[in-house]
Structures are given as C-alpha cells and as structure tokens.
C-alpha cells in the first residue's frame, strides 16, 4: 500500500511539470537561475536573484536592461485554445525604450505571444503595456499609448484570450481589447526579460508568471 502511494505521488509531481496545464494553470516562480517551472533554463548575461517586497517568499530575479535574460525550454500554453498569461513585475526607473517581459515562440516559425513594457513616450519616466500575438491564421498588436504607468512600482500584467477577444490588463484593469482568430501554438521556448533573439532587454525585477488554459476574469487575476 505504501509503495502504491509513493508511485501515485510521483505521477502527480510529474504531471505538474508536463507542460499541459490544468484548469488551475501553471505557476512559474521566478526565483532562481537554474530551473523555472521545473524546466531547464539557460542564463543570458548576469541576472541576479534578489529579495523583494513581493512574490513567492519575497524572491525575484533582477534584470539589468542591457544583457540579462532567461530562456526556458518550454512553451506552457502549446496546443491551448484559450488562455491567460500573467506576469508580476517591477520595472525600474530610467528604463529602455522597448522591453520584453515574456516572449513565447513556436519552434521553427515566427508564431509567438509577447508581453512588453514600452517607454517610447515623450516622458521617458512613464511606460505603457504592449502585447502581441501572431499565429498561423491571424495576428494582433494590442496597446494604448495613453494608458501610462510609473516605473519603480509593482504590477501584474495580464493577456487574456477568450476564444474571440484578446484583452490585456494592468493590475486587473482592462487597457485594450480586439477581436482575434487564434490557432494554438505548438511546442517552443519562452524567454523572460528579453526576446529570444537577445534584444529588447527588460530592466527591473520579475517574481512570478502564471499560464492558465482559460480566460480568467479580472477578479481572478494575480494581485501585484
């Protein structure tokens, strides 16, 4: 009986890292440089594990905006038709123009899902949220330049697709929404704090990412 219980526990642990999220989603605690979400992770530059006032166990990874990133050998929402992606982060002051929080790309194609901080404004001390989805049948760039935010504070950025509409949120408040015809991405990789081609470096701290295979309501989103 004890052996059967051990086998069952092993199967449960294995399924948690299979890359096929259940209704509760997959949580990536960005708290180390070796393995994110149970997946092998490649380090670019010299990102640092730091103590924060937010995140799991108040730990996050700090990126310098000029050469730091993480590449995870997984695309958690592969083969998923509807989804929510959330990132808990703190952008630093004096931020670069264009920075990627997260960049998910299908293997051997240009199909991708990205979430970005953009400071391409007259006032470089503010930023706006930019998201982009490209799949085999459609693509959509979603942002509102007038929806600006200050650096140096904690935020939860979210991208939600409900089967018809693509919507993005900051701290549970919707910023933009448009129609999208979406064909699920296949397997690939996910970079954190940078694009996979090593451009658009993020400056700040990221503490948590969650991937959910359903369209979460605003009140269900992670708190910053």
Image: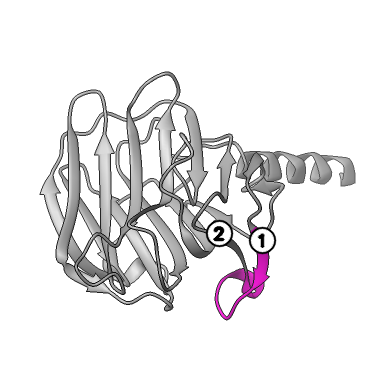
Q: Residue at x 43, y 49 (%)?
A: 102
Q: How far apart are labels 1 and 2 at the CA level? A: 7 Å
Q: Residue furthest top?
A: 108
Residue 73 numbered mark, or none? none
For residue 108: magenta? no
Q: Nearer the viewer, residue 19 or 48?
A: 48
Q: Position of residue 31 (x, y in %)?
A: 65, 60
Q: Position of residue 195 (x, y in %)?
A: 44, 41
What segment is highlighted magenta in the picture? 48-59
Dot 1 surroundings within 10 Å: few (below 14), some, or many (20 or more)?
some
Task: From the image, tell me which residue sits under label 1.
Answer: 48
For residue 58: magenta? yes
Task: From the image, tell me which residue sits under label 2.
Answer: 63
Residue 151 in the figure: left or right of residue 192: left
Q: Quadrant of residue 15?
A: top right
Q: How is the image coloured?
A: one colour
Residue 21 in the figure: left or right of residue 38: left
Q: Nearer the viewer, residue 63 or 123?
A: 123
Q: Nearer the viewer, residue 65 or 23?
A: 65
Secondary structure state at the residue bearing disc 2: strand
Residue 24 in sight in this render? no
Q: Position of residue 193 (x, y in %)?
A: 49, 52
Q: Position of residue 1 (x, y in %)?
A: 86, 44
């Amino acid at each position: 009986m004890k052996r059967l219980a051990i086998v069952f526990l092993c199967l449960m642990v294995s399924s948690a890292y299979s890359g096929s999220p259940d209704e509760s989603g997959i949580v990536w605690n960005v708290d180390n440089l070796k393995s994110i979400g149970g997946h092998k992770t490649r380090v670019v530059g010299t990102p640092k594990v730091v103590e924060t006032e937010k995140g799991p166990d108040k730990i996050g990874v700090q990126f310098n905006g000029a050469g730091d990133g993480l590449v995870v050998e997984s695309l958690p929402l592969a083969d998923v038709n509807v989804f929510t992606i959330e990132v808990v982060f703190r952008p630093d002051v004096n931020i670069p123009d264009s920075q990627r929080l997260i960049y998910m790309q299908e293997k051997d194609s240009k199909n991708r899902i990205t979430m970005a901080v953009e400071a391409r404004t007259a006032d470089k001390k503010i930023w706006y949220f930019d998201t982009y989805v490209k799949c085999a049948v459609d693509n959509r760039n979603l942002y509102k330049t007038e929806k600006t935010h200050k650096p140096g504070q904690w935020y939860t950025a979210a991208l939600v697709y409900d089967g018809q509409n693509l919507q993005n949120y900051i701290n549970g408040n919707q910023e933009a929404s448009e129609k999208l015809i979406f064909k699920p991405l296949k397997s690939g990789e996910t970079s954190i704090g940078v694009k996979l081609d090593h451009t658009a470096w993020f400056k700040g701290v990221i503490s948590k990412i969650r991937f959910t295979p359903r369209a979460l309501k605003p009140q269900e989103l992670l708190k910053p």
